[in-house]
Amino acid sequence: MDLPFSTEDLTRLYRFALLLTGDEGAAQQVMYDACVDCAARLGSYRNEESRMACMLGNLRQRAKPAITAAEGRGIVRAFAALPEEERAALAGLYVGLLPARGLAEALKISLEQLCQLLKSARERLDRGGLELGEPSLEQTL
Amino acid sequence: MKNEEAAVLIHCHCAGLPGTEDPRILKAVRAAEKDPGLQAELARQRAFDARVLTAVEQVMLPQALVARLAAGPEPGVRALSGKAALLQPVVLAILIGAVVLLGWGGVTLWNRAHSFSGKDSAIRMVEVNDEMTGMEMEPKKGLAGALDDWFFDKYGFEDYFVPAGFENYQTVGARLFKQDGEPVAQVAIEENNMIFYSFKAEDFGVALPNDQWHIFDDGEWVAALQQRDDECFMVAFRGSSSDMEDFLNKKK
């Protein structure tokens, strides 16, 4: 498949899919489907940011949480407890594919709304991590 | 930048990701770094982000996925959903073509089913009504079925014909006019402002089975025509095809 992304970009996109779905298998399938769906369109975008926004939008549309907050481990479990909007916003921020304004546009919200979502997501994640008995979110898959 | 604005925008800041900061966010961060009230919050956020980023960055791209992406779309995997398949340009073009063909076919069939020989002439007779002022007709009170002698005496017209069920309508006026050089008897009826027409079928190329009604619309008018041997009778009034069907059904 001819994709205009570096391995580093694909890794970041996969992280986004994983944080949204919470499951490695589901994330791989969502990522594969999004790449197949977007491959033909990506060439028509004039800049990198638009291509990334297309992929993020497609991944978000396809990604359904494959686990509940009670399942999974570490960071994935913590993200599964977030409402979808907060999960998408925080995952988008941490994978670092787009600047904040670009991320807001990809999520179809204003910059101020993105700020609010990120604030509440961080607070919820922080609280959730402690309640789940995970003093460190560095536990990974 | 005001501190209130900076307090909102710093939430879009993530220290461990250089190159992803907007100038406005960077400005907010600089303002927060100088504000004692925001410094602590910014520090907490940075520490939290660092912990999460460490976890997120340990996630690597699975080799199995790399191999699948490199291999390209799998046969049968690119099965499109119903909606996506319908939106493909080729499918859309075929569907639009099919719809146009079906529409055209439908219109052709409908026209064929509702058309008959001489219909254009009949329509023009009905259209005459819209150009009339009422002065064209000669006042004539009587029964519609009793005007055959009047038409013969006055115009030499021998083909006046009114079918059963229409003879007893009260007339208010009558005349004979020429269309394409051929005579047409026209009678104004008191009830429902109806107009009766009578003419020779062969003069206008009408060829219909005897006693069968053929209904057609023309603007706000609706008309029904039937032939008996070589004579035609047509009734017209303002209304729709369903009005005419109701009217004719009551005659049966």
Image (spheres, coloured by chain):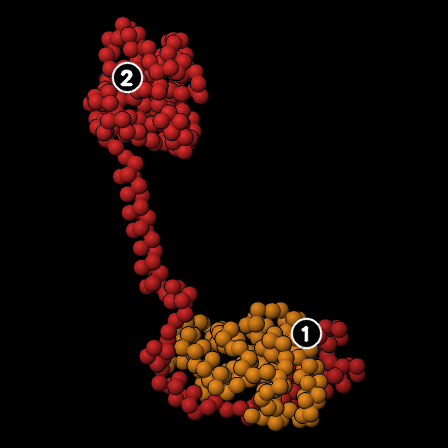
Chain colours: A orange, B red
| Horizontal side of residue B173 vs B22, given as left or right | left
Write down the quadrant of residue B50 in the picture.
bottom right
Asked if residue B23 shows in the view, the reply is no
* 2 or 1: mark nearer the eye: 2
The residue pinned by badge 1 equals A116
* Element under disc 1: helix
Residue at 38%, 64% in the rendered image: B86
Q: Residue furthest top?
A: B153
The residue pinned by badge 2 equals B161
Disc 2 vs disc 1: Cβ atoms closer than 8 Å? no
Looking at the picture, does residue A76 appear above or below residue B111?
Answer: below
* Element under disc 2: loop
Looking at the picture, does residue A40 appear above or below residue B140?
Answer: below
Q: Amino acid at mark 1?
A: Gln
Discs 2, 1: same chain: no
| Horizontal side of residue A101 vs B226, given as left or right | right
Q: Please identify the quadrant where the N terminus of chain B is shown.
A: bottom right
